[in-house]
Image: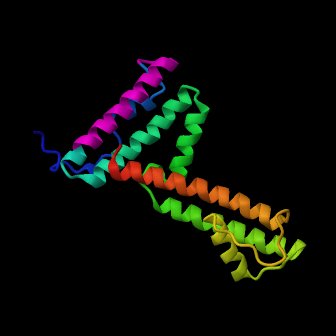
Amino acid sequence: MLLLAVIRWSELEMLGEEYEAHQKEHDGKAKDKVTRIEEYEQAVRAYRQLAVVLWAQGLNEDAARFAYRAQKLQRAVFFLERKPASYLFSLFLDLLAGHGYKPWRSFVAYLMVITTFATAYYVIGHAVGPAMSPLGSFVFSMTSFHGRGFFPGGIGLDDPLTALAALEAFVGLLLEVTLIATLTQRLFRK
């Protein structure tokens, strides 16, 4: 068994496969699209294989870094293959939670959504009524985000605040489901 614990993985910026994939030319000639895709796929495989071996030897932090790198390169493959839906979904997962490897991003997204909608409730409430205090707007935003919105007296179903609360509940559901899925994938390495 090859002992990988003696290697300082934190000093390794990228594998040779990735370096080769980033090169636009080979032997002075521009690489064709098929070659570029194949090289990126080789780099993805190399990072995933290295991550599996590192996890098996208990080097979890280094393994996570290389598994995350594989996800980012896989997005480059989607781009080269002209798969916009896969590319955009991968980008969304990366921005939201770093594919499960950077869960703090989800907390930042959560705060941004709550703050944005709380501000909107405050502004719209003062424009069309009923007016809300800053604290009331924040509480209304938090309960709406989690799909447990309550409506203070005087707000009907066709009110702009109600429509905004429904939109926030949908955004909240999307963010929660995505976070749970990415963290589950990360924790169980599937």
Q: Looking at the image, which is closer to me, 91 or 11?
A: 91
User: Is residue 29 among what the camera can see?
Assistant: no
> Which portion, as a residue range, is magenta?
27-53
Q: Image point 50% across, 55% down: which residue? A: 179
Q: Main secondary structure of the magenta part?
A: helix
Q: Position of residue 185 (x, y in %)?
A: 40, 48
Q: Image point 43% across, 41% down: which residue? A: 71
100 relative to 149 in the view: left or right: left
Q: Residue furthest left?
A: 1
Q: Position of residue 42 (x, y in %)?
A: 36, 28
In this view, 92 is above or below 172:
above
In this view, 175 is above or below 69:
below
Q: Position of residue 112 (x, y in %)?
A: 63, 65
Q: Colour scheme of this structure image?
A: rainbow
140 relative to 31 in the view: left or right: right
State which quarter of the image contains the C terminus. Answer: top left
**Magenta stretch: includes residue 34:** yes
Q: Looking at the image, which is closer to me, 190 or 65?
A: 190
Q: Position of residue 94 (x, y in %)?
A: 51, 48
**Magenta stretch: includes residue 32:** yes
State which quarter of the image contains the N terminus. Answer: top left
> Dividing the picture into quarters, in which one does residue 167 lie?
bottom right
> Dividing the picture into quarters, in which one does residue 26 lie?
top left
Q: Image point 76% across, 83% down: which residue? A: 133
